[in-house]
Image (tube, rainbow, N blue to C red):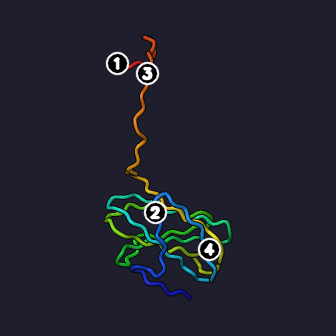
Amino acid sequence: MSLQRLNNPAGARALEFGQTVSASLDALAEMDAYSFQATAGDVVRVRMSEPDSLEPQIELFDAQGQRLAITSSFGDTILDVRLENGGTFFLLLSDEGGEETGGYSVSLQKLNNSGETMGSVSVQGQFPSQSPHRPR
């Protein structure tokens, strides 16, 4: 049996976009909690990978404890979701049946408007007059 508060779960580890964390579920029915910040309209991907015998389950909650999404599968589990509101969000990661223990990794990605720019690129040279790539 496991008991966890859904609004501001106890012991939640902060997770940043682009970060991957390795951890383990050491007891039956254990749930690991993570928190992250996002803005309204963000599209996020949470991936829970398992090298062991887990059946990974990902649950996403808002700051008030309302479940926004849940998914599970054998092997790697991926949750893609567009967040309607900004703020703090919480993930509860577990084995779907609560019957297995083992290691896993979790990663958080922002799929839209990353805010990262590549800088500018300067191209010099001439296109032959017959080139299909010649600007018009």
Which mark, residue 124?
3
Q: Can residue 78 be seen here?
A: no
The reply to whether discs 3 and 1 touch (Cβ–Cβ < 8 Å) is no
**Residue with the mark numbered 4:** 24
- Count of labels shown? 4
Q: Amino acid at mark 2?
A: Glu
Q: Amino acid at mark 4?
A: Ser
Report the Cα–Cα distance between label 4 and label 1. 58 Å
Where residue 1 sits, quadrant-wise, is bottom right
The reply to whether discs 2 and 4 touch (Cβ–Cβ < 8 Å) is no
Q: Quadrant of the C terminus?
A: top left
Report the Cα–Cα distance between label 3 and label 2. 39 Å
Which secondary structure, mark 4? strand
Label 3 or label 4, whichever lies nearer to me, is: 3
**Residue with the mark numbered 2:** 16
**Residue with the mark numbered 1:** 136
